[in-house]
Each structure stands twice: as structure tokens, then as C-alpha cells.
Image (tube, rainbow, N blue to C red):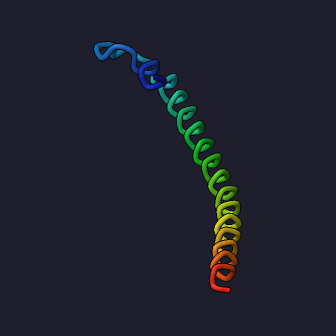
Amino acid sequence: QEMRDICGDENSYDIDQDYVRLKFISCVQKHQELIAFVENIKALYRDVMLGVVVLLSFLICLEMFQLMT
């Protein structure tokens, strides 16, 4: 959507270059913020998922032990 706002019609060639540059900088900054947000979410879920895997592995081993005895 923002790219359409920057470029407008395909036939309009009288776009201010400074305006386009500022809009592209804004888009890049938003993209970098999104990347940082995703990295934070990945770090959070990595720790949570590690805990879940360890806990489930322990529970499976405990259940197998109970079935064998």
C-alpha cells in the first residue's frame, strides 16, 4: 500500500525525489522494526519451546517407566 502511495499512477513522472526518498526511508525503518520484533518473538518462543520439550520428554519417560513396572 505504501509503495502505491509513493508511486501513484504509473504515468506520473513528476514525483518529488526527496518525497520518494523520505518515504522509502520510512518503509525501510518500519521493515527493520518488524524484523526486530520477529527476532524478539522468536527468542521468547525458543525458550518456552525448550521448556515444553524437556517437560514432555520427562513425562514420556516417567509414563514408560510406570508402564514397565
User: Quadrant of the rendered structure where residue 54 is?
Assistant: bottom right
Q: 27 above or below 1?
A: below
How far from the left and from the top, in percent, is residue 56?
Answer: 66, 68
Say how many tags the image has.
Answer: 0
Seen at 66% across and 56% down, the residue is: 45
How far from the left and from the top, in percent, is residue 6?
Answer: 45, 21
Residue in front for this viewpoint, 52 or 7? 52
Q: 50 above or below 29?
A: below
Seen at 58% across and 47% down, the residue is: 35
* For residue 60, side relative to residue 27 (left or right): right
How far from the left and from the top, in percent, is residue 33?
Answer: 63, 42
Residue in front for this viewpoint, 27 or 43? 43
- Farthest-out residue, bottom: 69
Residue in front for this viewpoint, 31 or 52? 52
Seen at 28% across and 13% down, the residue is: 11
How far from the left and from the top, in percent, is residue 7?
Answer: 40, 20
User: Quadrant of the rendered structure where residue 69 is?
Assistant: bottom right
* For residue 62, side relative to residue 27 (left or right): right
Q: 16 above or below 36?
A: above
* For residue 65, side relative to residue 1 (left or right): right
Residue in front for this viewpoint, 14 or 52? 52
* For residue 47, side relative to residue 2 (left or right): right
Q: 12 above or below 65?
A: above
Seen at 46% across and 18% down, the residue is: 5
